Amino acid sequence: MHTSPNPDASGESRLGLGSAHLDEPQALADPNRGPTVDTRLGVSTRMVLVFIALSVIVVFMIARWLDPDPSGRGTHRQLGLPVCHFYWVTGTPCPTCGMTTAFAWFVRGGFDQSFRANPAGLFLAAGSLVLIPWLLAGAALGRPVGFRSLEWPMVVLVACTIALSLVSWTIRLFFKFL
């Protein structure tokens, strides 16, 4: 005989106790406002947020260690990476050409040089800097700060990064051919 309150068909408590799905929102009844959604983040999600924040910090540390290439691209070669194949074949920079250089200038406060290396890189570096405390706060509080879930801000972040890179690349191509 099962003694937990409100067991469902699987025998688990509807209160969420003992549930293995800590990352799934659970409907909570609030007599004054109706059903709400519990947006607490599970332990694994919180650990991922900390890992991402630490990864971004490492990216900034590496950018600080690198010497920005004066040409505006090529800084990545100090990491042992090859020449951009797109640039090598076409003679035209790809959307990410200059991104490493932009980060290297950004961490030194050379925002104008960062913009010249890759405008999207400047904005991505600035966004990443803001992302660090947001991720850590979400991990510490156990809920996404300012949002009901993590999906929407993450999708918007990825979409904006891609769009900004493509717009920046299009503008750089346009001015090259003028």
Image: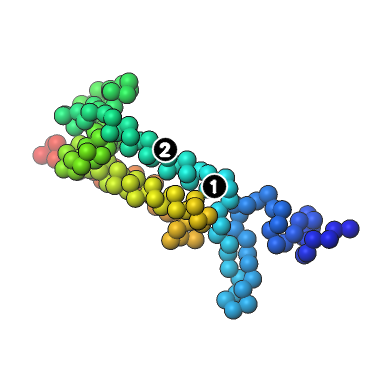
Residue 134 visible to the viewer: yes
Q: Taking 49 as reference, is 78 above or below it? A: above
Q: Taking 41 as reference, is 177 above or below it? A: above
Image spot of residue 117 (x, y percent): 20, 36
Quadrant holding the C terminus:
top left
Pointer 2: residues within 10 angstroms few (<14), some, or many (20+)?
few
Q: Which sits in the foreground, 88 or 78? A: 78
Q: Which sits in the foreground, 50 or 177? A: 50
Q: Taking 66 as reference, is 9 above or below it? A: below
Q: Residue at x 32, y 20 (%)?
A: 80
Q: Residue furthest front?
A: 140
Q: Which residue is mark 2?
A: 55
Q: Residue at x 57, y 76 (%)?
A: 33
Q: Which mark is residue 45?
A: 1
Secondary structure beneath label 1: helix
Residue at mark 2 to residue at mark 1: CA–CA distance: 15 Å
Q: Does residue 52 appear left or right of residue 164 in this picture?
A: right
Q: Residue at x 35, y 35 (%)?
A: 59
Residue 60 location, quadrant = top left
Residue 152 location, quadrant = bottom left
